[in-house]
Amino acid sequence: MCGIVGYIGNQKASPILINGLIRLEYRGYDSAGISTVEKDSLSVMKDKGRVKNLYQLKGINDLEGTIGIAHTRWATHGKPSKENAHPHLDNSKTFSVVHNGIIENYNELKKFLTDHGYTFYSQTDTEIIPNLIHYYYKNESGDLRFLQAVKNACSDLKGSFAIEVICKDYPDNMIVVRKDSPLVIGKGETENYISSDIPAILSFTRNFYLLNDLEFAVLTRDNVSFYDKDLNIIKKNTQTIEWNASSAEKDGYEDFMLKEIYEQPTAIRETIGSKLNEFSKCEFEELKFTKEYLATINKIYIVACGTAMHAGLVGKNAIEKLCQIPTEVDIASEFRYRHPLVDDKTLCIFISQSGETADTIAALKLSKENGAKTIAISNVIGSSITREADYSIYTHAGPEIAVASTKAYTSQVMLITLLAIYFADILDRNTTTVNQLKTDIMNLPKKIDETLKLSEVVKDFSKKVYQEKDIFFLGRGIDEAVAREGSLKLKEISYIHSESYPAGELKHGPIALIENGITVVGIMTDKNLVEKTISNIQEVITRGAKTLVITNQNVDKNMFNMTIKIPEVNPFISPILSVIPLQLFSYYISKEKGLDVDKPRNLAKSVTVE
Ligand code: G6P
């Protein structure tokens, strides 16, 4: 979703801003723009479409300003167009603003400003912000005039926002503020940076400041000052990020998605880290849970969106089987509005790669209000969700740039399985099973390497079915959770209609859709259920379906059009292997169709509005 970049320093701002926007492209957007402070005025250049349209605009190379803001917009209020693209100016052209989020009371504020003589040129909620700042600015004076006006305007805003403001009268200042929307500040020597996320400015700095809700930062070239919501000065220290800049580059791969699929052995190794030693208890230093506390828990909720929710389904299986604690998995946008039964005997786990998904954050806040203990699982240190939760644990997948999640999913599955082991160790439950699982996890990365070697076989089958209109995914038990993820991946990047079903449900409706030539993908890794699933696949073969089977069991290959044999592994972690052919399947279909794998239409990497 919308991306924000800012620069203040001694170099020309526009190339740095455009470079940052390119690195934020993966978040999803439909228009882009930049604004700089020029000699006595603010420049604004923007256009509909890709960032490359922006840097081809006439005059953009003539911008001399060394302070500027930039934005990629993902339309919410008003269609994608040049007029609606950010930055937006106030009527007097004193302030230029970019905004990520949604101003919920914008109609009310627009009427207020219209009544006070302001005119609006776009359909966006954002355009009220520079005008509101101007409205307050007129009545302010003194050193803090600019900051006070921004603060007053923000006090009127309801909703979520990450805002960058520059002012013609303050050519050496940039002000930023956030509420429920991501924004980080990168610290350089004689220059400072703003971004919606860390990878976009990782090549400039590894030192970041994180803002909490309704904190303001005033950036100059060599300093950043922080203020709370009442403009009291506050002190902040930088955090150093371990990721290196090359982790946000393609490194010779055609697409980020392919690179990220191949990074899974490392991501899993890093996520296991030092938490596991097959001869001792699983350790999570961040969590200090006791047997007494866990014994009081009568229900666990795992709440997330999209792929992260699918990782939660795998986690449920591990927690229920290893710890015997009833566990429910819910979609955050549903959970937050359905009055879930949550109290102090509930433990709520929230999974979010970005840590910025609006619905997941709202669900977490609700659980806390109802007295539950909360754990955040995220890939981004210091992200919003980790700052809200009682406890935070991290996947160490490195930056994930492709919109379709791959290494983040498998790392989430790994981490939540480790969490289940940690709980089981504390509760002294299922010791033999847990010890075996620990050993099998230690051997997992090399099995991922082996699975990745199946890529060519998957590619061949993808070439045969890439023109299909519908593809079905079937599985039972843990394989059903993987079927859901396989189906989602395919939809996201190939635009092929796809559905996943528990194989046993097939006869209750979906089989009516099976006809000659339809493709059905079956996932079978559970030896207790494999025969049952084969019977279901047999039913679709009888009706003319083409079949791809992903299995670690010895099945009769002659039955299916293609069988992909993955390494056998402990069932608790089989999704980490069985999902890989499915990731490659959607990747190669998307490539075969000539689509933009990393930036699929209409989708955003980080969904920061509800
Ligand atoms: C978007 C992304 C998905 C992701 C989901 C949840 O839909 O396109 O890849 O799974 O958001 O994101 P999160 O950052 O909370 O894991």
Image: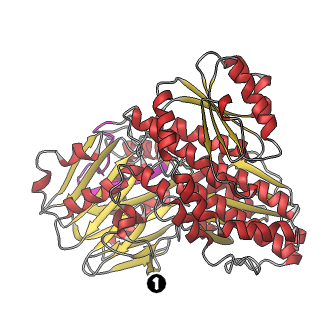
Disc 1 crowd, CA 10 A, few/some/many (<14, 14-19, 20+)? few
The stretch of residues the image draws in magenta is 81-102
Determine the residue positioned at 80% across, 60% down. Answer: 319
Horizontal relation, residue 335 to residue 403: left or right = right
**Quadrant of res 68:** bottom left
Horizontal relation, residue 356 to residue 240: left or right = right
Near-viewer residue (210 or 472) = 472
Q: Secondary structure at mark 1?
A: loop
Q: Is 435 inside the magenta-drawn segment?
A: no
Query: Does label 1 point to a residue whose CB lies under 8 Å from ligand 1?
Result: no
User: Against 148, is 516 above or below?
Assistant: above
Near-viewer residue (428 or 332) = 428
Q: Is 100 inside the magenta-drawn segment?
A: yes
Residue 286 in the image: state x and y as whole percent. Answer: 67, 78
Residue 85 in the image: state x and y as whole percent. Answer: 32, 43
User: Against 174, is 63 above or below?
Assistant: above
**Which color scheme is applied?**
secondary structure
Residue 116 in the image: state x and y as whole percent. Answer: 36, 46
Whether residue 379 appears in this view of the structure is: no
Determine the residue positioned at 67% across, 19% down. Answer: 514
Horizontal relation, residue 298 to residue 145: left or right = right
Residue 444 in the image: state x and y as whole percent. Answer: 63, 63
Whether residue 574 appears in this view of the structure is: yes
User: Against 578, is 69 above or below?
Assistant: below
* Residue at image mark 1: 235
**Quadrant of res 49:** top left
Three-letter code for the amino acid on which mark 1 is drawn? Lys
User: Against 509, is 223 above or below?
Assistant: below
Near-viewer residue (81 or 125) = 81
